[in-house]
């Protein structure tokens, strides 16, 4: 009995040591990369859970408070401005590799130059967007644009759009904070500050509704704290030991700007292709089968996409770690980590996808009611699509870390175009099932095959002794 108790205590201490190790820095760069990736994954998951909970609460509170018309206007403005998220031309993501590479080589001066260049380029873009908005705003009939009719909604439409645009513009140059933190393999800080901003925005929203403030004030209360949290994140990051990395009042180097524009542009094309490729299925189904059939695709798609979102949250932190390891010439670490991430991600996805195939209709019945129920065949093809994503994600993050964006951008663009064609063809023949089959076919031909070849070639070129 005494021996069993000692073994149990030893096991608990061992587990405690592993957990404590996640929060303790180490001089071993291999372990440090894993530690930072694990910490980022944990904090990102916590931030996502709080964000989802806050979203559910705010929908419930604001819909009752504003009414259907004013709430609908808020969501329309939000969707419109969100679509402008591509306005940074991918630079907030393009800076990740530059920072990881320069810091991996021990060149902090070059890292500062990259951060400074990105900050001023994003500031110029924000200034242009502000100027265009200021010129266009006086001529906009905003209430007609959002198709609102009540006197209160019409009076709030213009100011509400202005407040949302202001938050969007302020957020643009702050993208350098997110990108730099990620490149420094400190994504956990981003997640924690986002978590703080989400909680603060929920509190401010409750206060605004308590004082019966209008829609523009509610939008500021909801979006403003997130911008403020990102600002504080930047102040904290660029103080202390990272003070030398803070953006400076200097003219950016053209060579750095060209690199940022190229990398950001490739990532921009990649993001745009993914967005078009993934969102086009809803439009194809609506045009061929009618809008009422879209729910039969969109609801199970959102259910299975939750698996992909979890996978991205857990594995995206490895992207800057690859860039850091490449800069240090640690090819062996890259190959070993790629195998581990691929195997763990695939095992997780297959397990969850099987559960969703078996219990998908029951989950949707609890979630949205009995109005949406699909065939087992539809659930199966969604599960297959999930597995294809799980195969592609590690390859995408590997190629991101190796700065091989061009091949991904070309493959993504071809996939988006092919997906539309295959989806139209298959939806006419198989219905909703055809939309998923079209996406899978396009991904297999345009992404899985060519990107597998590129990834294997890149890994084979690395020195096995490094």
Image (tube, rainbow, N blue to C red):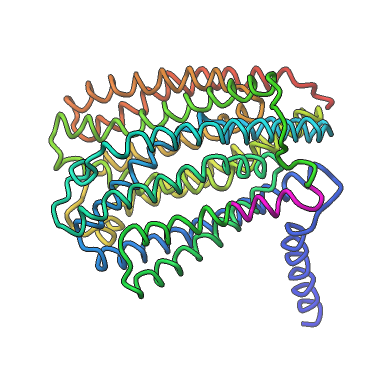
Answer left or right for 377 relative to 39. Answer: left
Q: Quadrant of the C terminus?
A: top right
- Range of residues picked out in magenta: 231-242
Q: Of 379 and 79, which appears nearest the observer?
A: 79
Residue 94 lies, with reference to residue 38, above or below; the image says above
Residue drawn where x is 64% and y is 23% of the image: 257
**Residue 258 at x, y percent in the picture:** 63, 19
Left or right: 248 as drawn, with respect to 436: right
Let me know if residue 166 is in the magenta part: no
Instruction: Determine the image quadrant of residue 223.
Output: bottom left
- Dominant secondary-structure state across the stretch colored magenta: helix
Image point (17%, 25%), residue name = 429
Is residue 235 among what the camera can see?
Answer: yes
Q: Is residue 335 left or right of residue 391?
A: right
> Going by the image, does 464 lie left or right of 52?
right
The residue at 69%/23% (across/down) is 256
Q: In terms of depth relative to the viewer, which is nearer, 138 or 45?
A: 138
Residue 32 percent location from the top left of the image: 78, 47
Question: Who is closer to the viewer here, 271 or 301?
Answer: 271
């Amino acid at each position: 009995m005494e021996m069993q108790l000692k073994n149990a205590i030893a096991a608990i201490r061992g587990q405690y040591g592993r957990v404590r190790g996640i929060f303790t820095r180490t001089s071993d760069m291999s372990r440090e990369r894993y530690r930072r990736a694990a910490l980022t994954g944990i904090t990102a998951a916590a931030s996502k859970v709080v964000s989802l909970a806050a979203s559910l609460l705010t929908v419930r509170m604001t819909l009752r408070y504003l009414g259907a018309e004013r709430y609908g206007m808020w969501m329309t403005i939000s969707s419109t401005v969100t679509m402008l998220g591509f306005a940074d031309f991918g630079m907030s993501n393009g800076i990740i590799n530059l920072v990881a590479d320069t810091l991996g080589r021990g060149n902090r001066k070059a890292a500062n130059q990259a951060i400074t260049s990105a900050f001023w380029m994003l500031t110029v873009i924000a200034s242009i967007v502000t100027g265009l908005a200021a010129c266009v705003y006086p001529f906009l009939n905003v209430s007609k644009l959002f198709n609102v009719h009540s006197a209160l909604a019409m009076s709030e439409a213009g100011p509400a759009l202005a407040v949302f645009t202001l938050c969007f513009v302020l957020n643009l140059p702050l993208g350098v904070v997110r990108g730099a933190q990620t490149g420094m393999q400190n994504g956990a800080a981003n997640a924690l500050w986002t978590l703080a901003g989400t909680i603060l925005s929920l509190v401010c929203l409750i206060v605004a509704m308590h004082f019966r403030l209008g829609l523009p004030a509610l939008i500021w209360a909801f979006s403003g704290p997130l911008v403020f949290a990102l600002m504080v994140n930047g102040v904290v990051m660029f103080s202390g030991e990272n003070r030398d990395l803070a953006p400076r009042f200097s003219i950016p180097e053209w060579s750095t700007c060209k690199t940022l524009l190229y990398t950001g542009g490739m990532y921009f094309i990649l993001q745009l292709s993914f967005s078009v490729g993934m969102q086009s299925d809803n439009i194809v189904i609506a045009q061929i089968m009618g809008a009422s059939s879209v729910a039969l695709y969109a609801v199970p798609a959102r259910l299975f996409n939750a698996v992909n979102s979890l996978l991205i949250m857990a594995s995206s932190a490895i992207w800057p770690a690859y860039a850091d390891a490449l800069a240090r010439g640690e090819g062996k670490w890259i190959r070993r980590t790629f195998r581990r991430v691929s195997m763990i991600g695939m095992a997780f996805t297959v397990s969850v996808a099987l559960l969703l195939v078996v219990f998908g209709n029951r989950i949707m019945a609890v979630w949205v009611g009995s109005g949406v129920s699909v065939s087992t065949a539809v659930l199966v093809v969604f599960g297959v699509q999930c597995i294809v994503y799980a195969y592609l994600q590690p390859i995408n993050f590997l190629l991101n870390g190796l700065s091989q964006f061009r091949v991904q951008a070309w493959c993504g663009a071809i996939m988006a175009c092919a997906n539309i064609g295959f989806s139209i063809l298959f939806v006419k023949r198989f219905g909703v099932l055809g939309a998923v089959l079209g996406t899978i076919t396009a991904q297999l031909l345009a992404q899985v095959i060519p990107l597998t070849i590129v990834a294997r070639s890149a890994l084979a070129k690395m020195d096995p002794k490094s």
